[in-house]
Image (tube, rainbow, N blue to C red):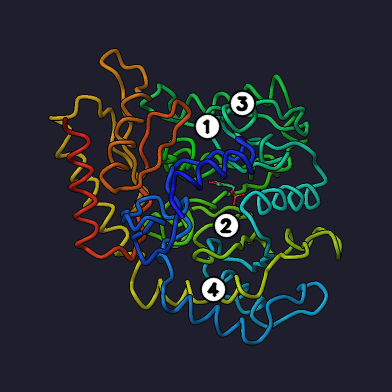
C-alpha cells in the first residue's frame, strides 16, 4: 500500500475535520523512530503529541500489556473491579503534589479528565463558575472547548458552549502580559463578571501546551494558590501535557512549591494506551455521589497495566533526569543558532518541554517561517509539531528514551532547516 493511495482513500472515507498533519502512513515504530508504509524512516520529535515519554513500544510496556491480554481485556471496572486499578491509584496518590490524603479516578482521554475535574470541583464546592486562561487548551468536548482559550481550529462552528466559564490572560512576557497584568485581570473579572464566591475552580496549565509552551512564572502560580485559598476556590492543574516526566519532574507543579487541589493527567501516563486520571484531595474527590464518575472504558485494564510499567520505566531508567538533560542540550543548541536565525524570538521551556518562537522583523508572529521549518524538517525525516495561539512556535516532544545518536541526528536536521 502506497502513501498516495492511502491519502486518496482517507479523503474519500474520513471527514476533513479530523485534520491530519502528515501525508505518509505509519507502518511500525520503535523508541524514537517511525517507518512509513513505503519504508521511509522518521525521527519522532512529536511522540504522538506528548504521549510517548517512554518511547514507542518500550519492551517493559509491551510485556505488561501482553501479560494483561492473557488474563482479561475488559470487565468494566465499575462492574467487576480489578486490583491493578487500585495499585495505580495508590502510586499516583503517593507521587502527586500535595502533602495530604489523595484519591484518584481513571478515565480514558485528557478531555474526559478535565470534564470530570470540573464535575468534582462543582460537586465539592456547590458553585457553578470556572475560570480558565487565554491560550489554554483543555480538549475537544463541550466543556473542554468552553475552557479552551484558542478559537481556531478548536471552537469554530461548535458553540454554544457550556456557560459560567470565564477567561483571564495567561502571563507571557514576550507578548506583553506580565504576572501583574494577569492577576489584575482576575480582580477585574471578580468585580465585573463573576462573584468569586460563585467560582468553583480555576483551571490552568503549569506550562501551556497547545498555547505555545508558555511556562507559568512561580509568582503567578503562588498568587493563584493564594487567590483560591482566599475565596474558597479549588485550583486545578491540567497536567495532561506537562505530566509524567516531561518537565524534569513527574508533575510540573513540583517546580512551584505549592500544590493544586486537583490534577488532571493523561498522555504519557500510560505510554501510548488510552488512559487519563483525576487525582486530588480525598475529601474533594469523594464529593460526587456513587455512580457520578466513571465510564464504560474508564481505567481499562490494558492501559492500567501499561501505566504501572511506565512508572517502573521512569524510575529504573532515571528518565526524568535524562529528559531534563536532553532539554538542556536542545536549549543550548537553539541558543547557539540564534545569531544565524533572526526569526528566533525566544527559546523557552521547562525540563524536556522546550519550544522556540519565531517572529518577523517587525515583531509580529512568523507562522509562515514556522510552517517552512516544520515542512523542511519533515522532508529530511524529522517530525516536529507547532503550537501557539499564532501558530508560530515549534515545540519539541522527543521521547525521553531517545538514544543519544538519534537525538544528535534530529538536532542536526533541526539546525540545518533553521539556518538557510
Ligand atoms: C493540557 C491539555 N489538556 C487536555 C487535553 C485533551 O486531551 P485529549 O486530547 O486526550 O482529550 C490536552 C491535549 O492536548 C492538553 O494538552
Q: Confirm or deny contact between disc 2 and disc 4 (CB under 8 A).
A: no
Q: Confirm or deny contact between disc 4 and disc 3 (CB under 8 A).
A: no
Q: Work out whether mark 3 precedes mark 1 in sequence or the reverse, and give the earlier one.
A: 1
Label 4 within 8 A of ligand 1 by Cβ: no
Q: Work out whether mark 2 precedes mark 3 in sequence or the reverse, and give the earlier one.
A: 3
Which residue is more in the foreground, 51 or 95? 51
Q: Where does residue 162 sit, x and y in percent of width and height?
A: 77, 34
The local secondary structure at tag 2 comes to strand
Query: Distance between the Cα atoms at labels 1 and 2?
Result: 19 Å
Foreground mark, 3 or 1?
A: 1
Query: Distance between the Cα atoms at labels 4 and 1?
Result: 31 Å
Where is mark 2, residue-wise?
265
Label 2 within 8 A of ligand 1 by Cβ: no
Quarter of the view holding residue 149: top right
Disc number for residue 187: 3
Where is mark 4, residue-wise?
306
- Residue in the image at 56% along x and 65% along y: 273
Quick check: 370 left or right of 2? left
- Residue in the image at 76% along x and 77% along y: 75
Q: Work out whether mark 4 precedes mark 3 in sequence or the reverse, and give the earlier one.
A: 3
Q: Where does residue 58 sit, x and y in percent of width and height?
A: 41, 72
The local secondary structure at tag 4 comes to helix
Q: Work out whether mark 2 precedes mark 4 in sequence or the reverse, and give the earlier one.
A: 2
Where is mark 1, residue-wise?
135
Q: Where does residue 21 sit, x and y in percent of width and height?
A: 46, 40
The local secondary structure at tag 1 comes to loop
The local secondary structure at tag 3 comes to helix
Query: Distance between the Cα atoms at labels 4 and 3?
Result: 43 Å
Amino acid at each position: 500500500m502506497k502513501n498516495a493511495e492511502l491519502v486518496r482513500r482517507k479523503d474519500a472515507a474520513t471527514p476533513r475535520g479530523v485534520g491530519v498533519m502528515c501525508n505518509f502512513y505509519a507502518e511500525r515504530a520503535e523508541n524514537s523512530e517511525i517507518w512509513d508504509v513505503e519504508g521511509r524512516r522518521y525521527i519522532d520529535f512529536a511522540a504522538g503529541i506528548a504521549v510517548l515519554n517512554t518511547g514507542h513500544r518500550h519492551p517493559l510496556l509491551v510485556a505488561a500489556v501482553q501479560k494483561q491480554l492473557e488474563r482479561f481485556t475488559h470487565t468494566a471496572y465499575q462492574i467487576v473491579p480489578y486490583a491493578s486499578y487500585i495499585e495505580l491509584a495508590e502510586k499516583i496518590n503517593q507521587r502527586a503534589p500535595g502533602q495530604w490524603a489523595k484519591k484518584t479516578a481513571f478515565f480514558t482521554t485528557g478531555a474526559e479528565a478535565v470534564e470530570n475535574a470540573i464535575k468534582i470541583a462543582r460537586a465539592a464546592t456547590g458553585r457553578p463558575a470556572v475560570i480558565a486562561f487565554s491560550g489554554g487548551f483543555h480538549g475537544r468536548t463541550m466543556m473542554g472547548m468552553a475552557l479552551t482559550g484558542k478559537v481556531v481550529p478548536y471552537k469554530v462552528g461548535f458553540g454554544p458552549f457550556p456557560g459560567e466559564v470565564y477567561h483571564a490572560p495567561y502571563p507571557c512576557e514576550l507578548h506583553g502580559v506580565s504576572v501583574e497584568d494577569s492577576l489584575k485581570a482576575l480582580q477585574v473579572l471578580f468585580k465585573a463578571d463573576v462573584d468569586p464566591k460563585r467560582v468553583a475552580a480555576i483551571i490552568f496549565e503549569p506550562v501551556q501546551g497547545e498555547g505555545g509552551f508558555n511556562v507559568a512564572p512561580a509568582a503567578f502560580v503562588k498568587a493563584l494558590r493564594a487567590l483560591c485559598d482566599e475565596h474558597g476556590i479549588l485550583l486545578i492543574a491540567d497536567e495532561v501535557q506537562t505530566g509524567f516526566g516531561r518537565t524534569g519532574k513527574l508533575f510540573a507543579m513540583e517546580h512551584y512549591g505549592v500544590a493544586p487541589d486537583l490534577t488532571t493527567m493523561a498522555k504519557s501516563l500510560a505510554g501510548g494506551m488510552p488512559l487519563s486520571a483525576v487525582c486530588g484531595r480525598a475529601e474533594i474527590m469523594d464529593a460526587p455521589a456513587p455512580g457520578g464518575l466513571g465510564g464504560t472504558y474508564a481505567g481499562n485494564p490494558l492501559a492500567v497495566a501499561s501505566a504501572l510499567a511506565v512508572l517502573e520505566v521512569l524510575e529504573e531508567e532515571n528518565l526524568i533526569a535524562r529528559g531534563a538533560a536532553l532539554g538542556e542540550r536542545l536549549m543550548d543548541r537553539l541558543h547557539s543558532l540564534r545569531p544565524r536565525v533572526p526569526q528566533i524570538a525566544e527559546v523557552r521551556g521547562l525540563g524536556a518541554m522546550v519550544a522556540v518562537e519565531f517572529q518577523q522583523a517587525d515583531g509580529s508572529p512568523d507562522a509562515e517561517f514556522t510552517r517552512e521549518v516544520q515542512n523542511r524538517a519533515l522532508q529530511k525525516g524529522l517530525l516536529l509539531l507547532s503550537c501557539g495561539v499564532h501558530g508560530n512556535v515549534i515545540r519539541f516532544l522527543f521521547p525521553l528514551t531517545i538514544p543519544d545518536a538519534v537525538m544528535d541526528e534530529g538536532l542536526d536536521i533541526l539546525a540545518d532547516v533553521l539556518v538557510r
